[in-house]
Image: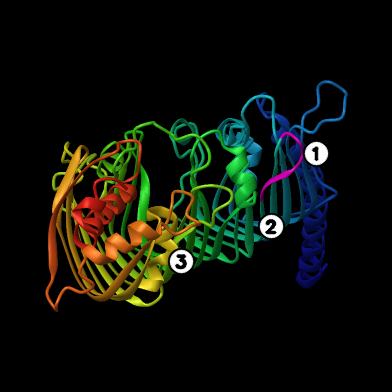
Amino acid sequence: MSLLKKILIGTGVLILLLIIANYGISYWISQKLPSVLQSEEKMPYNISYRDLDIDLLRGNLTVLDAALSPKDTSGTPMKNGAFGKIDKIKIESFSLWQLLVNDKIKVQHIIIEKPEIILYPEENKYHVKGKLVKPFKNTISTETIDLTEGKFTLLDSTDKIKLQAYNIKINLKKIKVDSSTVKNNMPVKYSSYLFNCDSIYYQAGSQYHITTQKITLSDTSAIVNNFKLTPELSRIAFAKSIPKEKDQYRIAVEKIHVPNSVWGFVNDTLFVHSPEINLNKVNAVIYRPKMPTDDLSTKKLYSQMLRELNFDLQIDKINLKDSYLEYQEQQSYDREPAKVSFSNFNATVANIYSPLHKEEFPTTSLDVSCLFMKSSPLNVHWTFNIPDQSDSFTIKGHLQNVNSSTIDPVAKPLMNLTTQGDLEQIYFTFNGNRETSNGAFAIRYENLKVKLYKKDGKKENKLMSAVGNLLAKNDSDGDLKQADVSVDREKSKSVFNFLWRFLQEGLKKTLLPKIMTKKD
């Protein structure tokens, strides 16, 4: 027999053995894999698939039509826990040795296509770390995971959607899950991640829902497009549904951009650090109905709220660009709400932090440039120091060129007066703390006349209007008319109520005769 013939026969036998071995091992793996996945006693889920394709030469494994469902020990239909289906799972560089020797699935790359997960509520609080991570702590490790075209739905106890996300894409690199990581706050370790989805819907309690369009998140940055916080109730329905005074918010943000950030845990303490957060075209409307009973609980000032945070927060700068803010306050169901608006709103907030793990405590500042009531330039500079136990702060403002008719939507509902004329310049310095305030108020005006109304806000109090216009000068003769102002804080009210009462007192002291300022 020639050498060539021997080589051909040997090669043929070898190929035949490889084919037999491939089929044999493939069959063995197809039988072994389900037992590995189910071998953990604490594994709470059944995992199944329609077909399994194994390429031993390349170390690749493809699972088709995989399904995930909770183990049913009762024999009755279940709507409890996580249910899922996945079109395809492709595993690249599969380690046969780890499966044979250690009953572990170790791979280089996992590709998950079109997963759809539905999470039903459980009788006990759902715990991802305990339910999904711990059962796999000795089973799977991989360098990279790619997930494409995913859909996730979280239902509440009535089977209504609480959270839903569409067209999810995830990339995770250098994933590690083992007996040491599962003990940490972050049970899955990774070197980097990238998350994308087309839209998110979230039911944020009984009164609001949140929607977004495209979201892009990574381990260092975040972009959220068209964020919206929308009330579930109309204003009147909201006012009738609350036992005590409470604000209703309607907020839209065209774009939220965090260009650089870092977060994690140090000794079980969460830290969140970012040099900058950008909010573009915020549109916020705040509605406060005064018809329900007053909420007399003490309201914390911002310095106290930041001082009492139990995690390490550090944001160097927050930028609001080209935004619109509106506050509405309604005194009764039969009266229109007072409206205060701030358009072309641009602001920079510097040094937002919690004192935890800090050695330096810089002053927190807010600088605002906007149009008051869509027409009058307003600039505000607000400062406070977070560690200051007295919660002292200073707000300085300058308002220009106010046609008095533009403030009637505020003055009539809240002060029972309307005006005619021009307020050319208003300056104020408001020094406050958790107890009281003092400062200065100055105004320059001309051709000013007032019209005062009776308590119901409908009929003019002609006598008081006549007396007021008779005794008060209708202009300041080109000079600033100044007054020292002091107002005690109502601790059941917000800092903005505190500021408004300070400004209201300044207006009364400078515009109205003393005989008319003794009572609102």
For the question of whether residue 53 can be seen, the reply is yes
Please tell me in which quadrant of the rendered image residue 374 appears.
bottom left
x%, y% of residue 93? 62, 56
Q: Pointer 3: what residue?
A: 282
C-alpha distance separating marks 1 and 3: 57 Å
- Closer to the N terminus: mark 1 or mark 2? 1
Magenta residue check for 158: yes
x%, y% of residue 283? 48, 66
Q: Of discs 1 and 3, which sits in the foreground?
A: 3
Q: Does residue 467 lie above or below 421 as drawn?
A: above
Q: Does residue 272 lie above or below 488 as drawn?
A: below
Q: Of discs 3 and 2, which sits in the foreground?
A: 3
Please tell me in which quadrant of the rendered image residue 211 appears.
bottom right
Q: Nearer the viewer, residue 193 or 32?
A: 193
x%, y% of residue 419? 36, 68
**Residue range corresponding to the magenta coloring:** 157-163
Residue kind at label 1, given as amino acid type: Gln
Q: Pointer 1: what residue?
A: 31
C-alpha distance separating marks 1 and 2: 28 Å
Q: What residue is shown at x 64% (from left), y 35% (from top)?
A: 103
- Closer to the N terminus: mark 1 or mark 3? 1
Q: Nearer the viewer, residue 66 or 158?
A: 158
In the picture, which quadrant includes the N terminus? bottom right
Residue kind at label 2, given as amino acid type: Gly
Kindly check if marks 3 and 2 are in contact, taking CB atoms under 8 A apart as contact. no
C-alpha distance separating marks 3 and 2: 30 Å
Q: Is mark 2 on a helix, strand or loop?
A: strand
Q: How crowded is mark 2: few (under 14 residues within 10 Å), some or many (20 or more)?
A: many
Kindly check if marks 1 and 3 are in contact, taking CB atoms under 8 A apart as contact. no
Q: Pointer 2: what residue?
A: 150
